[in-house]
Image (cartoon, rainbow, N blue to C red):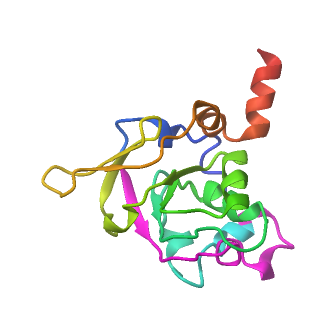
Amino acid sequence: MTNRIATNSIATEPTATHRVWRVGADIDTDALAPGAYMKFGIDEIARHCLQRVRPEFAGQVQPGDVLVAGPNFGIGSSREQAASALVRLGVAAVIAPSFNGLYFRNAFNVGLLLLTCPQADVLAEGEHITLDPASGRIGRAAGVDPSELHCETVPAFLMDMVRAGGLLNLLKQRQTS
């Protein structure tokens, strides 16, 4: 498996559309990065991402797709690989009503966009949406009610991390500037 995207410019392009993958509430870090594979590199871990809840996910997700979840996404351990696996698979963003605090920090540190959206449950499997994280809006197809969802806005410093592909890349960019 190759690194599908080095930075997450897909998630920050306002005209890009993203296909929705749905999972439920309380998705823990062991579902995202199963413990049995933690002794391997991120490529192998990513191959098993969500296999317990969506066995087809890792093999079928496409760069730019988004994961929509119920509350408490990322609960469990502090393993950074739980966010890195989604980045490796090319996931543009995770949208959920709430996130575990450690997962939230790890996700932005590796360049994964998270959108806190109380209405995430109205997004349907396979639906195509647009993201505007700076204004906190998710656009939906014409004729779909509601045609727009409102989420918490993502602060500029976190968007800088997403655009750079994570905190380390952002620091390297700033060092060479």
* Closer-to-camera residue (138/87): 138
| Residue 83 shows in the view | yes
* Quadrant the C terminus occupies: top right
Percent coordinates x, y for residue 27 in the rendering: 59, 75
Q: In this view, does 110 lie above or below 144?
A: above
| Image point (22%, 55%), residue name | 146
Range of the magenta residues?
18-43
* Quarter assignment of residue 73: bottom right
Residue 138 locus on image (x, y percent): 35, 48
Residue 133: where, in percent of width, then height? 46, 40
Q: Where is residue 9 in the image (x, y as percent from the top left)?
A: 53, 37
Q: Up-down: is 44 above or below 168?
A: below
Left or right of 133, for residue 6 = right
In magenta stretch: residue 86: no
Instruction: Determine the residue located farthest toward the left in the rendered image.
Output: 143
Query: Which residue reaches farthest right?
Result: 39
Judging depth in this view, the residue of 122 and 6 nearest the camera is 122
Foreground of the two, 37 or 69? 69
Q: Point out the image quarter for the N terminus.
A: bottom right
Decide if residue 1 is in sight here.
Answer: no
Q: Residue furthest top?
A: 177
At a point 73% along the width and 46% down the height, the residue shown is 109
**Apparent side of residue 22 relative to residue 30 in the rendered image (left or right):** left
Verify whether residue 35 appears in magenta: yes
156 relative to 144, above or below: above
Please, is residue 50 above or below residue 63 in the view? below
Q: Residue 8 sits in which quadrant? A: top right
> Which residue sits at x=46%, y=57%?
66
